[in-house]
Image: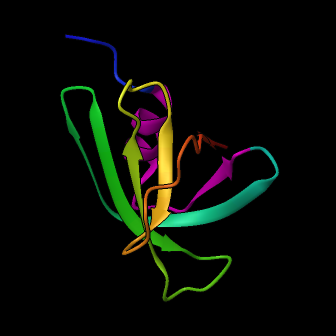
Protein backbone atom coordinates (compact mmCIF):
# COMPACT_ATOMS: atom_id res chain seq x y z
CA UNK A 1 0.00 0.00 0.00
CA UNK A 2 1.38 3.46 -0.86
CA UNK A 3 2.26 5.87 1.95
CA UNK A 4 -0.55 8.09 3.21
CA UNK A 5 0.00 11.84 3.28
CA UNK A 6 1.35 12.49 6.82
CA UNK A 7 -0.60 15.75 7.23
CA UNK A 8 -3.86 14.14 6.18
CA UNK A 9 -3.19 11.14 8.41
CA UNK A 10 -2.64 13.38 11.42
CA UNK A 11 -5.82 15.39 10.73
CA UNK A 12 -7.76 12.14 10.37
CA UNK A 13 -6.38 10.81 13.69
CA UNK A 14 -7.04 14.07 15.59
CA UNK A 15 -10.57 14.76 14.41
CA UNK A 16 -13.19 15.49 15.73
CA UNK A 17 -10.99 17.57 18.06
CA UNK A 18 -9.93 20.98 16.71
CA UNK A 19 -6.65 21.10 14.78
CA UNK A 20 -4.53 24.18 14.02
CA UNK A 21 -3.39 24.28 10.40
CA UNK A 22 -0.83 26.55 8.77
CA UNK A 23 -1.93 27.32 5.22
CA UNK A 24 0.55 28.67 2.69
CA UNK A 25 3.01 29.96 5.27
CA UNK A 26 1.62 32.88 7.25
CA UNK A 27 -2.09 32.06 7.11
CA UNK A 28 -3.18 29.73 9.91
CA UNK A 29 -6.46 28.72 11.46
CA UNK A 30 -8.21 26.31 13.80
CA UNK A 31 -10.46 23.78 12.08
CA UNK A 32 -12.99 21.25 13.39
CA UNK A 33 -13.79 18.46 10.99
CA UNK A 34 -17.15 16.76 10.81
CA UNK A 35 -15.77 14.05 8.54
CA UNK A 36 -12.49 12.81 7.12
CA UNK A 37 -11.85 9.87 4.83
CA UNK A 38 -9.14 8.16 2.84
CA UNK A 39 -9.44 6.28 -0.41
CA UNK A 40 -6.02 4.76 -1.03
CA UNK A 41 -3.77 7.89 -1.05
CA UNK A 42 -6.59 10.37 -1.62
CA UNK A 43 -7.80 12.31 1.44
CA UNK A 44 -10.90 14.42 1.98
CA UNK A 45 -12.05 16.27 5.06
CA UNK A 46 -14.94 18.64 5.72
CA UNK A 47 -15.49 21.00 8.61
CA UNK A 48 -15.52 24.57 9.82
CA UNK A 49 -12.84 27.10 10.75
CA UNK A 50 -13.57 27.95 14.39
CA UNK A 51 -11.30 30.98 14.75
CA UNK A 52 -12.97 32.85 11.88
CA UNK A 53 -16.46 32.72 10.42
CA UNK A 54 -17.97 29.66 12.12
CA UNK A 55 -20.63 29.37 9.42
CA UNK A 56 -18.07 29.00 6.63
CA UNK A 57 -17.55 25.37 5.71
CA UNK A 58 -14.20 24.18 4.42
CA UNK A 59 -13.02 21.14 2.54
CA UNK A 60 -9.51 19.69 2.50
CA UNK A 61 -8.38 17.47 -0.36
CA UNK A 62 -5.05 16.06 -1.45
CA UNK A 63 -3.39 17.46 -4.54
CA UNK A 64 -3.22 15.41 -7.73
CA UNK A 65 0.31 14.26 -6.85
CA UNK A 66 -0.72 13.52 -3.20
CA UNK A 67 2.15 15.67 -1.93
CA UNK A 68 0.07 18.45 -0.36
CA UNK A 69 -3.33 19.03 1.20
CA UNK A 70 -5.40 21.86 -0.28
CA UNK A 71 -8.05 23.91 1.46
CA UNK A 72 -11.07 25.59 0.00
CA UNK A 73 -14.30 27.05 1.20
CA UNK A 74 -17.20 24.82 0.22
CA UNK A 75 -18.64 26.21 -3.01
CA UNK A 76 -15.39 28.06 -3.87
CA UNK A 77 -12.91 27.08 -6.59
CA UNK A 78 -9.97 24.92 -5.52
CA UNK A 79 -7.07 26.92 -4.14
CA UNK A 80 -4.12 26.11 -6.38
CA UNK A 81 -0.92 25.08 -4.67
CA UNK A 82 -2.21 25.59 -1.15
CA UNK A 83 -0.27 23.48 1.30
CA UNK A 84 -1.38 22.76 4.83
CA UNK A 85 0.52 21.52 7.82
CA UNK A 86 -1.02 20.30 11.06
CA UNK A 87 0.25 21.79 14.30
Does residue 10 belong to the magenta stretch? yes
In the drawing, does residue 57 fall left or right of residue 24?
Answer: left
Q: Is residue 38 above or below residue 2?
A: below
Relative to 24, does residue 17 appear above or below in the rendering?
A: below
Question: x and y percent of residue 77 in the render?
Answer: 43, 64
Q: Indicate whether residue 16 is drawn in magenta.
A: yes
Seen at 48% across and 74% down, the residue is 48
Q: Which region of the structure is painted magenta?
A: 6-24
Q: Which colour scheme is used?
A: rainbow
**Looking at the image, which is closer to me, 24 or 49?**
24
Name the image quarter holding the N terminus. top left
Q: Work out which residue is located at the far right of the displayed protein and give it.
A: 26
For this view, does 24 lie left or right of residue 34?
A: right
Residue 15 rendering spot, x and y as whole percentages:
41, 55
Q: Quadrant of residue 75?
A: bottom left
Q: State the residue at coordinates (38%, 24%).
A: 65
Q: Which residue is drawn at 53% across and 46% down?
A: 80
Looking at the rendered image, the quarter that the C terminus falls into is top right
Q: Would you say 1 lies left or right of 31 here?
A: left
At 49% from the left edge and 89% from the top edge, which residue is drawn? 55
Q: Which residue lies furthest to the top in this view?
A: 1
Across and down, in percent, residue 47 comes to 41, 69
> In x, y percent, where is residue 72?
48, 62
Foreground pick, 74 / 41: 74
Q: How many labels does the image show?
A: 0
Amino acid sequence: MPDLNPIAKRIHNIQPRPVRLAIDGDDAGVFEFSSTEFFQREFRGEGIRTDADGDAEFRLITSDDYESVRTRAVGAPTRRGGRSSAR
